[in-house]
Image (cartoon, helix red, strand yellow):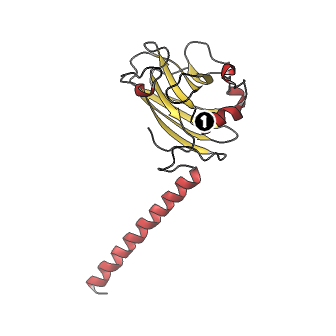
Amino acid sequence: MSMQLRSRSVRFGIAAAALGLVAGSAAAVSAAGGGGAARHGSGGSSGLIHEELSGYEEAPLALSTTGHGTFRAMVTDAGIEYRLTYADTVGTVSQAHIHFGAVGQTGGISVFLCTNLGNGPAGTQACPAAGEVTGTIVPADVIGPASQGIAATEYDELLAAIRAGTAYVNVHSSTYGPGEIRGQIESGHEGHH
């Protein structure tokens, strides 16, 4: 085989492999319900979430804090498998929740993710000073907020709020009791604000 033909074959093989990788990645993202262009979920039965948490998203006042975190989850009709990570908070972490509220709104608690205050439902895990909290949210974990139209165990209402972009994750601390870092949840949103 001539050098020119061999070089052309190698370039063709590399190009074919790259196209296969891109096609496989696109199929995986599509199957997971994510996508770079879509900010809101399609209303389907599942969605991949990856949100960044910061003080800049706190409400009613944004905060300048060293704290940061991520919330990753797979949302399905049966449950929400999640992983919350956070670090460098100014205050000692006291609790973390999913709240019912739109961007810029403060809303009631829908689900406890962790607490060190003894105020969560039985079985609520303790919050580490920094690190990771994982679990699966099922209907029994939804506690409300009744004052905003979500009764205890109304998991479908929590899903509707998430799919509408009106739920958020909030990590509270001893310095910032109402919340130090926050991230709006958007089903099917792979990325951050």
Q: Is 174 situated above or below 89?
A: above
Residue at the spot of label 1: 162
Percent position (x, y) of residue 6? Answer: 31, 81
Tally of numbered discs:
1
* Secondary element at image label 1: helix
Identify the residue at image location x=50%, y=51%: 35
Residue 154 appears left or right of 33: right
Compare residues 113 and 105 and report the one nearer the observer. 105
Image quadrant holding the N terminus, namely bottom left
Q: Amino acid at mark 1?
A: Ile
Farthest bottom residue in view? 1
Identify the residue at image location x=46%, y=66%: 20
Identify the residue at image location x=62%, y=21%: 124
Q: Quadrant of residue 40?
A: top right
Q: Quadrant of residue 117?
A: top right
Whether residue 148 appears in this view of the structure is yes
Identify the residue at image location x=48%, y=19%: 179
Whether residue 138 appears in this view of the structure is no
Percent position (x, y) of residue 131? Answer: 46, 28
Percent position (x, y) of residue 171? Answer: 49, 23
Percent position (x, y) of residue 160? Answer: 66, 36
Compare residues 104 and 137 and report the one nearer the observer. 104
Circle 1 packing at 10 Å, graded few (<14), some (14-19), many (20+), is: many
Image quadrant holding the C terminus, namely top left
Q: Is 56 situated above or below 93?
A: below
